[in-house]
Image (cartoon, helix red, strand yellow):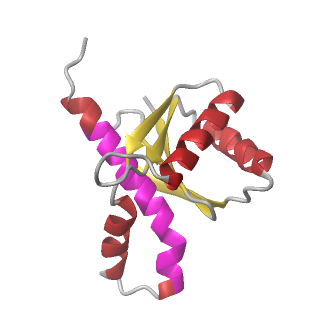
């Protein structure tokens, strides 16, 4: 099954995708998030879903370390709900605690400029979200 992962942010969305065999996770793109005009973002995501034959979407849910939901998690949950109203696919929420920090650590080692690291950060966070989702899915008992 081909999944699309979204790292939701108030300024940007990072997107990643996996191959149909759920083995390879790759960064897809980064989209600006204009919270005052969400329709173009949803239209672009719907277009990417069709173009890449995506069968389900995974949205990162940034829980606090004590498993509670702060403002960012609530906004991510609301985004996933709104996206679900626009597309006819299953949407899963995946705990994404520390995914952005992990992306920062990976990028810091590359020697890229600060701006180039910033441009790639959200896509790499989306890759981590999707990889964690796939790993969890494989480790759960199948019905």
Q: Residue furthest top?
A: 143
Please say whether residue 23 is visible from this viewpoint: no
**In this rendering, position of residue 143 left or right of residue 24:** left
Q: Quadrant of the N terminus?
A: top left
- In this view of the protein, which residue sits in the foreground, 87 or 19? 87
**In this rendering, position of residue 105 left or right of residue 35:** left
* Residue 4 magenta-highlighted: no
Residue at horizontal 34 percent and vertical 40 percent from the top: 133
**In this rendering, position of residue 131 left or right of residue 44:** left
Q: Position of residue 51 (x, y in %)?
A: 64, 39
- In this view of the protein, which residue sits in the foreground, 61 or 5? 61
Residue at horizontal 48 percent and vertical 60 percent from the top: 123
Please say whether residue 106 is visible from this viewpoint: yes
Which segment did they paint magenta? Answer: 115-135
Q: Quadrant of residue 42?
A: top right
Give the total of numbered labels: 0
* Residue 127 magenta-highlighted: yes
Q: Position of residue 101 (x, y in %)?
A: 35, 68
Q: Quadrant of the C terminus?
A: top left
Q: Position of residue 32 (x, y in %)?
A: 68, 62
- In this view of the protein, which residue sits in the foreground, 92 or 67? 67
Secondary structure of the magenta portion, mostly? helix
Q: Position of residue 27 (x, y in %)?
A: 47, 57
Residue at horizontal 30 percent and vertical 45 percent from the top: 132
34 in relation to 110, above or below: above
Residue at horizontal 24 percent and vertical 31 percent from the top: 138
């Amino acid at each position: 099954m081909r999944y699309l992962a979204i790292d939701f942010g108030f300024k940007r969305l990072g997107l990643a995708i996996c191959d149909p065999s759920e083995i390879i996770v790759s960064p897809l793109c980064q989209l600006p998030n204009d919270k005052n005009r969400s329709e173009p973002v949803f239209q672009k995501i719907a277009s990417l879903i069709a173009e890449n034959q995506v069968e389900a979407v995974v949205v990162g849910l940034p829980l606090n370390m004590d498993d509670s939901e702060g403002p960012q998690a609530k906004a991510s949950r609301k985004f996933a709900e709104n996206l679900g109203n626009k597309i006819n696919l299953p949407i899963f929420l995946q705990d994404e605690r520390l995914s952005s920090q992990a992306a920062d650590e990976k990028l810091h080692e590359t020697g890229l400029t600060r701006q180039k690291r910033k441009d790639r950060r959200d896509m790499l966070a989306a890759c981590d979200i999707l990889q964690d989702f796939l790993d969890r899915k494989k480790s759960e008992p199948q019905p």
